[in-house]
Structure formats: structure tokens, C-alpha cells
Amino acid sequence: MDIDQQIDAALRQAVDSSLDEKTPSGLAAAIEHAVFPGGHRIRPRICLAVARAAGTNTPELAMAAAISLELLHCASLVHDDMPCFDDAAVRRGRPSVHAAFGEPLALLAGDALIILSFQVLAAAAASSLQRFKTLTELIGSSVGLPRGIVAGQAWECETSVDLDTYHCAKTGALFAASTMTGAAAAGVAHEEWLLMGKYLGRAYQVADDLLDHGGDAELVGKPTGNDLRLGRPNYVSDVGVVAANKKLRELVALAEQSIPDCAGRNELVAEVRRESAAFISLTTRSLEAA
Amino acid sequence: MDIDQQIDAALRQAVDSSLDEKTPSGLAAAIEHAVFPGGHRIRPRICLAVARAAGTNTPELAMAAAISLELLHCASLVHDDMPCFDDAAVRRGRPSVHAAFGEPLALLAGDALIILSFQVLAAAAASSLQRFKTLTELIGSSVGLPRGIVAGQAWECETSVDLDTYHCAKTGALFAASTMTGAAAAGVAHEEWLLMGKYLGRAYQVADDLLDHGGDAELVGKPTGNDLRLGRPNYVSDVGVVAANKKLRELVALAEQSIPDCAGRNELVAEVRRESAAFISLTTRSLEAA
């Protein structure tokens, strides 16, 4: 199995382990819809690549961290799409969860995925209880208060917001967790991996802004132009497409340079280049198609 | 400090630890409103009483488990009150969270409290990593799939439901977790404490049904008659007030009888009697006042 198949198999196992014959079928279907088929699975890919580069001896814990991140990402999309936030009817080229299953089940599916993300860590904890504790802390911080995803989302409810604080929380925190949890799952100092995650998060944000600003909805898998419609900040609106593309490449280069010394550094650099090339290609194709 | 003050102080510390100068103020206020002032704090009281009876040597871990349960209870109330579920404008004699702060912040406050409930466990994990793992599993099961609170809530979205399955998940699971986490925080076999928690949960459900069926809204702190209005099952509607009161007392007696052998058994029996007497008194006064 390649890494994408391994991630999907682990997600499948996690979701299936949370169901039994007494699970309400509507909620089970809503969760299935939220997680499968996925998007780029970029956060778990980063986590696993870092864990490999850092020479992990507990690959099952790294995989648990990877899918915990992905489940939380899925949960945040489900709740963000709901009518009281983005009111987005389409996600990944299909109806969003609330559009397909209604608001009550979308709300509960998000809740269930948040809970499952911590259960998944506990289920793999036996390989190292100390690392399990660190992973719970890192992942909790990346989604919780004061500076994780929920904080980022809550800035959308404030009358004024510092743009960097908003992006760091809403997008950056889970990317920073992707590199740091990879390191923590490998039992190495995770703080050194923060910077790489931050740059990757900012690169992703610029790519996302490029796609939303002028991307082709079909290639992106959801309606574009949301930032303009919802009055949200968008980097491309500020600096233009050319400068944003330049910034994206700069941030990827900075992410590469931030990789700490480790046994698999060269392979990880190559991996970051592959991942970012795929993203840059998507933004280019999407902008051309639009 | 008496036990209620200790619980509130620990909740205060947990909530404050999740805030800093970069926390969006709206979300911070919504979380404050969701947690303070509280209701009966009955789940953390049970957890702590069991941990004491089982002779815990890690009281800080027992307190972490206790407030984790209470944060999850608060989260479930916030999400249950939202327009897509109960659409309840009043809770604990005040506006519900979405009524006071709007749906977006209510949704996020519930999410943040779920995340915080796991962070709180990790913060106290150092006293025993193995117990921390067990607590994460027990608490995850009590709120997640397949049979925790989110499953209970999801049964309300199904066209047919087995009443016992519904109540076990929606109310019983967190009560069962209250006794089992108390035991697990004390490092004793938690399975033996399941039955006591189950009976307490059923007793609480009958008391809750009594209050909703004919209680005084002011004493109860929220509008009553919800079950009738929303077409929900209510035990009192089925068997009447007299039989329901008899059942409540029977269930409390069964809970007492289910307490496993432990050093503090007598004290725990006395505690269960005090707790249940307070509840039985509330139902009696509330029914008289209505």
C-alpha cells in the first residue's frame, strides 16, 4: 500500500471501530460522508513524513497522530460549512454534510469526529504512554483554545481581527501540529519542528487564497470566491496573483530550510517539494481553467 | 473549601488556562456562560466520591476526571439547546448560550469544551500515565460513538428508537463514566463500578422526567414540558407520578447495593443518600410548586 492507501485504511479502521450495531444509522452515514472520500490528506502526509525522517520506532503511534489530525480537519470542515458559518452547500465536489444529512447530524458528526480524534490516540498509546500524553497536548492545542482552530473560527465572529492571529489559529495551528506530532510520535524534541509547520501552513493558506480568489470550482471541488462573498481577508486580493505565487514558492523554500537536522532530512526535503509541486500545479491549472 | 467549591475552583482553573490575551473575547464569554454558574455538578461529585471511597492516591487526577466530565456535560447542553435540536432559549434560569451569544459562538463553545475536556486529563496525566490512558478511553466512550452522548442525541434524528438504548447513551453513559472514572483515577478495576453508575443514571433520568413532566419552571431553572412539546419519551407520561417516584427510590437503592467492596463504602452510601435526597426533595418541591 502506498502512503495514501495506508492513511485511508487507518481512517477506515478508526471510523469502523467507533460503530457497532447500536450506532444510529444517520450519524454513521454523516460521519462516513465527512471522512470518505477525503481531500489531499496533506496533514497526515506531513505528520508521517516527519515521523519517518525523525526515525520513529513507533509507526503505529505516528499513524494514530496522523489520522487524529485528519479527523479534526474533517470535523472543522463539517462545522465551518454549517449555515451559521459559511453556509456552504458543496464540499469536495459533493453536498456538504449538513446539505446531505441536515444540521443536527452535521453538528453531531463534527462532535463525534473531535472525540474520535482523541480516542484514536489512546488506542495507540500502549507503544509509549509519554508520547501519547505529548500528542494529546499538541493536538489539543492545535484545535482548542487559546490559539487553535476553534479560536481561528471564533475570530470570524469578532468586529476586528489581526489577520496573522486569525490565519495562525484557523489554518496554521493544525499544520504546525502536523510537523510537531510527527516528531513527538518519533520521540524527538517537537519544538524544533514548529517553524517548518508554520511555513507550510502559511504556504497552504496562500495556495488556498489563490484557489478561492480565481480558481476553477470544479477542479477545487467547491465554489470559489467565498472570501469576497463573505467579506473575508484574502492574500491575493491584497497583492495580486503574481506576487501571491511568488510568496507561495518563497514559503515552501523557507519550510525546507527549517527542517531540523535528522536522519531522513534529504528524503523529507524531496517530499516537501513533491507535495508543494502538486499544490502549485493545482493552483496553476485551476487558475488557467477559471 | 467544600467539595462544590473545589470543583468550581478546578473548573475555573481549567477554563482560565485555556484563555490568553489572544483568545477571541466572544468565544471566551460564551464558554464562561456555558460553565459558570453551574447546575448541580452531580457528575463530578459522583466521580470524586467514588475516587475517595476507592482510596485514591492521585486526587489531582480524580479532580481532572471530574471536571472533564462536567465540561463535557456543559458542552452537550450548549449543543443540545441549539435551534437545530431543542431550540431552548433558557438554561439554568438564564438565556442559553446561543440565545445570549448567537449560534456560531454556541457551536464553537461546545467544540472548545469537548477539546478542553481531553486537555484537562493530559494536564494531570503526570501522576499516572496508565490511568490517564484509561480515563481518556472511558471518557471518550461516554461521549462518543457508538454509545455515548452524541449517539444518544443522534437517536433523536432517527424515525424509530429503542427507548433504553436512547437513554443509556444520552444520559446513562456519562453517569456510568462518573463512577468508572472515579475508580480508574484511583487505580482500581473500573468495570466493577459500571452498575452503580448505570443505576444512578437511570435514577437521574426518572428525576429529570418528573421535573420536565410537571415541575415548576422557576425551581427547575428552565421551561418544563419539553418532552411533551417535542414528542420525546417521558417515563412519567407512561406510568404516572406516583409510580415514577417509587421507581426513583428503587433505582437509588439499587445504586447503593451496587457499590463494590471498598475502604470507603459506608461513606459512599451516605453520600449517595444525601445526593439522592436532594434530588428527591427538588422533584417534590417542584411538583408541589407547579
Image (cartoon, coloured by chain):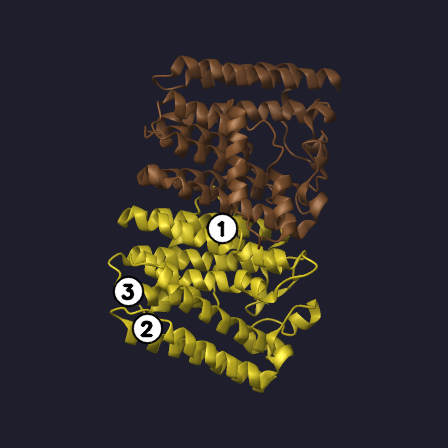
Chain colours: A brown, B yellow
In percent of width and height, residue A209 lies at 63, 26
Residue A125 in which image quadrant: top left
Say which label, 3 or 1, has the lower sequence index. Answer: 3
The kind of residue tagged 3 is: Ala
The kind of residue tagged 1 is: Ile
Say which label, 1 or 2, has the lower sequence index. Answer: 1
Q: Residue at x 48, y 23 (%)?
A: A199
User: From the viewer's perspective, is residue A54 above or below residue B112?
Assistant: above
Q: Describe the element under mark 2 as helix, strand or loop.
A: helix
Q: Residue at x 34, y 40 (%)?
A: A126
Q: What chain is tagged by disc 2?
A: B
* Circle number at residue B54: 3
* Circle number at residue B114: 1
**Are dots 3 and 2 on a single chain?**
yes
Q: Mark 2 = which residue?
A: B268
The kind of residue tagged 2 is: Leu
